[in-house]
Image: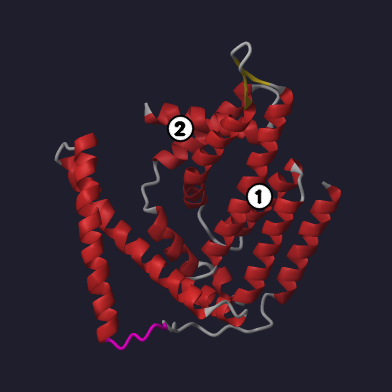
Amino acid sequence: MILLWRTLVYSAFFQLLFDFPGAVYSLVPGAVTALVLSTTKVSDLMLIDYTAYRSPLRRIEGLYKLIFFLFCLLLSISRVSGRFSLSLFLFQAILMIGPGKVPLKRYLRFLEAPVMFLLMGAIGIALELDVFPLTVSVSQASFFRAQEVTRTALCAISCLYSLSLSTPLNQLMQTLRKIKIPERMIELMIVLYRYIFVLFTMYYPMKRALIMRGGNNLRGHGMLWSSLFKRSYERADHSMRSMLSRGYDGSVQFLSVPVATARGLLPMLVGMALVLAGAWLL
């Protein structure tokens, strides 16, 4: 049943993205995507950090990657063209799966949660509500508007994912320090990032235990979240005490592997030239 539901959702999303001549043509990629994701059992949050540390692109200077992906992000938002956004999304996907060595299953798994939100948003944009008389309809203009917004949003999400999957946290924090981001903001990002991991490392075992004991209902989930809040607060307090006992003074320093400063400059310039050419042609 879950596989059928996923097939319908991804088929609708592919139809919205690529505008196939018939809805039946989107069933094949939708079914393949649903089947691939049904065999992938991973923790998305933990795997993002693991993938970034294993990526060959981590050896490229972090500043170049930040400039390139933010350039793509700003261009995709400012250039209101569905074809360009879709092309840039495919370019980012090829970049991550090819040189970035991110497995296809894993990349699709990362995109699963944003796809659900984008599809719900697209439905809200496409539907038109008339009060007198009370009718709900989808016009060609509203469908195209939903299509453009979905393509642009997916492209922007892929830019941020590409940065996350190719840049480890320590390299990203050092890059932010280089461009003079306020130190307090960087420290807040590090602490929040750490506590999100603490929360999820506690959530997954508790969720599995709840399901195994037959408590997969509303009352069981309420008890899970209340217990999770209490235990995560205690864990965060213990973590802060451990940091203070080790000399934490409000500044977190990372050790990182040094990279050649000039490495990655040429690929960044070539990539920006390709993106600009695509924006001009599309």
Q: Residue at x 64, y 55 (%)?
A: 92
Q: Is residue 155 visible?
A: yes
**How much space separates mark 2 and mark 1, taking CA atoms?**
22 Å
Q: Are marks 2 and 1 in contact (CB under 8 Å)?
A: no
Q: Quadrant of the N terminus?
A: top left
Q: Residue 249 magenta-drawn?
A: yes
Is residue 27 positioned above or below 252 on the image? Answer: above
Measured from the top left, where is residue 53 in percent x and y? 47, 70
Which residue carries the number 2 mark?
A: 6
Is-magenta flag for residue 41?
Answer: no
* Residue for badge 1: 89
Residue 66, located in which quarter of the rendered image?
bottom right
Residue at image location 40% in from the left, 57% down from the top: 45
- Judge by depth and name the residue closer to the eye, 136 or 206: 136
The residue carrying pointer 2 sits among few (fewer than 14), some (14 to 19) or many (20 or more) residues within 10 Å by Cα, namely some
Q: Decide: is 154 above or below 176.
A: above
Residue type, numbered disc 1: Phe
Residue 277: mark in rendering: none
- Say what secondary structure mark 2 lies in: helix
The reply, left or right, for residue 158 in relation to residue 183 is: right
Name above or below for residue 22 compared with residue 278: above
Q: Which residue lies most toward the top here?
A: 133
Residues shaded magenta? 246-251
State the residue in front, 257 or 194.
194
Counting from the top left corner in percent of width and height, residue 216 is at: 22, 37
